[in-house]
């Protein structure tokens, strides 16, 4: 049966990950279980590409059809699921948020991966007299969109992604297979591993630049975990290598006593262009508990399909996720312990936005260098 979903997206989003943001992305996918279809890149501003003939892998929401058949996973989130975490709100099909990579990819596809990769490569070049990194490492990579974009643009020779979610690893590999040519795909490696304990083989090291993006470091709620992560990177990194970390802006850390809701919607259409509902994303809710001693917020995260699409076997998920909020001073101290030095900070993955810009800075982006 031909399964086709066209998904134009208008993402209007404020306060992503506790930060201010306004972003419009127009995108569409034509998905089919049968083979080749024109695809408008969700983040590539209308660039078309072709899906590999015979690929069994549907993109985005269609991905969740397949996941429906898997047994429900244990409660929890990443490596930080703890017995102390509040019990997640029951959903019709209990899934962990990162075990639905297609939905995650759709929800966070508003980013321009090409521009963000330009920034990441550019920051490494600034530290190395214009020399680009040959081999990169993306930790807690999710769909690994940045590594794939870097290989696509030819700015790196090899890209390694690491994530501890088997579903994300499988999804990232399939995405890379679809998006990359044969040579670039051979230069792509996706390892299922923990970002605090991973070790790279000689074939995959040394790496020149490592990236931890979209607040993924927040899953490491204890200092020991962050230090272990930095030390693992340090061990497999070339001398003077760069480590770039993207976090929510610390102003959110200091206003968290009153947690604010961050949400946005992705409108969905069926194959005939008819409205078929929407994907509602909540990334932090008003009543989230925040522990000011541990600096850990019990983040409500939810992706819920509403409307006609909700009856189309598409899943919804809601979970409570412990996420640590960092200050810039902590990153500085933890970096020193892990063998790095903070060289610069920005307010976004954009070198024109100062971290001190009260209006424009919505992230804390730290560029570290191996010492
Ligand atoms: C918010 S997503 C970010 C994904 C990606 N960095 C991006 O920019 O879209 C966080 C990712 O971290 C992964 N993760 C959480 N804890 C981890 C750990 N201890 N080791 C490796 N991956 C982890 C999750 O599986 C998830 O894919």
Image (cartoon, helix red, strand yellow):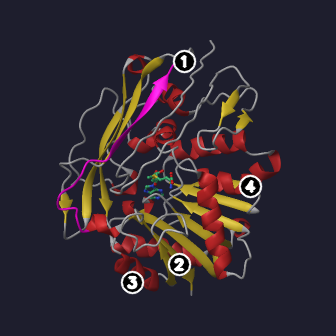
Alpha carbon separation for disc pair 3 and 4: 34 Å
The circle on residue 333 is 3
Residue at point 58% right, 59% down?
Answer: 116
- In the orientation shown, which residue stands out farthest toward the right? 183
Image quadrant occupied by the C terminus: bottom right
Looking at marks 3 and 4 on the same chain, the residue that comes earlier in the sequence is marked by: 4
Mark nearer the viewer, 1 or 2: 1
Mark nearer the viewer, 1 or 3: 1
Looking at marks 1 and 3 on the same chain, the residue that comes earlier in the sequence is marked by: 1
Q: Position of residue 112 (x, y in %)?
A: 58, 51
Image quadrant occupied by the N terminus: top right
Element class at badge 2: strand
The residue indicated by pointer 2 is 368
Alpha carbon separation for disc pair 1 and 3: 52 Å
Element class at badge 3: helix
The circle on residue 153 is 4
CB contact under 8 Å: marks 3 and 4? no
Looking at marks 2 and 3 on the same chain, the residue that comes earlier in the sequence is marked by: 3
Q: Is mark 2 within 8 Å of ligand 1?
A: no
- Up the image or down, 83 lies above or below 32; here it is below
Check disc 4: other Cα within 10 Å, few if <14, some if 14-19, many if 20+. Answer: some
The circle on residue 273 is 1
């Amino acid at each position: 049966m031909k399964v086709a979903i066209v998904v134009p997206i208008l993402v209007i989003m404020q306060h992503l990950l506790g930060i201010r943001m306004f972003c419009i992305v127009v995108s569409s996918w034509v998905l089919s279980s049968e083979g080749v279809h024109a695809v408008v890149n969700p983040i590539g501003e209308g660039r078309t590409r072709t899906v590999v003939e015979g690929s069994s892998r549907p993109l985005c929401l269609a991905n969740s059809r397949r996941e429906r058949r898997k047994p429900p996973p244990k409660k929890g989130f990443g490596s930080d699921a703890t017995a102390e975490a509040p019990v997640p709100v029951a959903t019709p099909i209990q899934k962990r948020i990162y075990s639905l990579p297609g939905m995650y990819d759709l929800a966070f596809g508003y980013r321009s991966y090409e521009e963000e990769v330009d920034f990441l490569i550019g920051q490494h070049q600034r530290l190395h007299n214009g020399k680009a990194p040959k081999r990169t490492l993306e930790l807690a990579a999710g769909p690994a969109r940045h590594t794939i974009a870097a290989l696509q643009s030819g700015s790196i020779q090899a890209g390694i992604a690491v994530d501890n979610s088997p579903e994300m690893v499988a999804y990232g590999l399939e995405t890379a297979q679809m998006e990359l040519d044969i040579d670039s795909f051979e230069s792509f490696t996706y390892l299922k591993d923990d970002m605090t304990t991973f070790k790279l083989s000689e074939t995959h090291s040394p790496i020149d630049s490592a990236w931890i993006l979209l607040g993924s470091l927040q899953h490491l709620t204890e200092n020991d975990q962050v230090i272990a992560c930095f030390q693992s990177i340090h061990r497999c990194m070339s001398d003077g290598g760069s480590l770039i970390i993207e976090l929510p802006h610390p102003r959110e850390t200091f206003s968290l006593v009153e947690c604010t809701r961050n949400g946005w919607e992705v409108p969905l259409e069926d194959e005939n262009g008819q409205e078929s509902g929407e994907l509602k994303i909540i990334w932090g809710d008003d009543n989230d508990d925040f522990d000011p001693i541990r600096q850990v917020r019990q983040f409500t995260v939810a992706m819920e399909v509403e409307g006609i699409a909700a009856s189309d076997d598409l899943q919804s998920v809601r979970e409570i996720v412990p996420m640590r909020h960092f200050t810039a001073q902590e990153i500085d101290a933890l970096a020193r312990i892990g063998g790095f030095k903070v060289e610069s900070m920005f307010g976004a993955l954009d070198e024109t936005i100062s971290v001190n810009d009260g209006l424009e800075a919505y992230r804390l982006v730290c560029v570290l260098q191996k010492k």
